[in-house]
Image (spheres, helix red, strand yellow):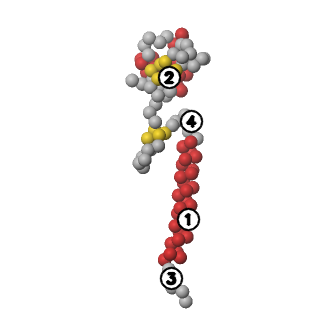
Amino acid sequence: MPRFSPARFLAPLALIAVGVGVVVVVQRETHDSAKPAQTTTSTSGPHRHKAKRPRTYVVKQGDNLSAIAQRASVSLATLQRLNPGVDPQTLHAGQRLKLTR
């Protein structure tokens, strides 16, 4: 009668654990990539950091100040405070707006 070997019991469990780990990682990556307009930077450590928000925004044709504030996740009041010389009624394409200090 053959002897009981722990490897005969542990090897299938290890394969199952690896399979579950792969599924979890793929689902997390798929879920993270479904988020709109957020980028991340890859680091060599275990921590992932989100990329810094852009500091300026270049106005495009048809933009208005409230739409820019919403797209940049900045309040309208903050956008107006950071850009005191900008008239919201006369925005033009190519104009640069500060989003953060």
Do we see residue 66 in this rendering?
no
Which residue in the protein does label 4 denote? 36
What residue occupies the far front of the structure in this picture?
44
Crowdedness near tag 4: few (<14), some (14–19) or many (≥20) residues, C-alpha within 10 Å: few
Which residue in the protein does label 2 denote? 57
Crowdedness near tag 2: few (<14), some (14–19) or many (≥20) residues, C-alpha within 10 Å: some
For the point 47% across and 19% down, the residue is 97
Q: Position of residue 75 (x, y in %)?
A: 47, 24
Query: Which of the two discs, 1 and 3, labels the residue nearer the N terminus?
Result: 3
Which residue in the protein does label 3 denote? 4
Where residue 16 is drawn, which disc sits there? 1
Query: Which of the two discs, 2 and 1, labels the residue nearer the N terminus?
Result: 1
Looking at the rendered structure, the kind of residue marked 2 is Tyr
Where residue 96 is drawn, which disc sits there? none
For the point 55% across and 59% down, the residue is 20
Query: Which of the two discs, 4 and 2, labels the residue nearer the N terminus?
Result: 4
Q: Position of residue 36 (x, y in %)?
A: 56, 36
Query: Which of the two discs, 3 and 4, labels the residue nearer the N terminus?
Result: 3
Query: Which of the two discs, 4 and 1, labels the residue nearer the N terminus?
Result: 1
Local secondary structure at mark 4: loop
Q: CA distance from mark 1 to mark 3?
A: 21 Å
Crowdedness near tag 1: few (<14), some (14–19) or many (≥20) residues, C-alpha within 10 Å: few
Looking at the rendered structure, the kind of residue marked 1 is Ile
Looking at the rendered structure, the kind of residue marked 4 is Pro
For the point 44% across and 16% down, the residue is 83
Query: Which of the two discs, 2 and 3, labels the residue nearer the N terminus?
Result: 3
Q: Are marks 2 and 1 in contact (CB under 8 Å)?
A: no
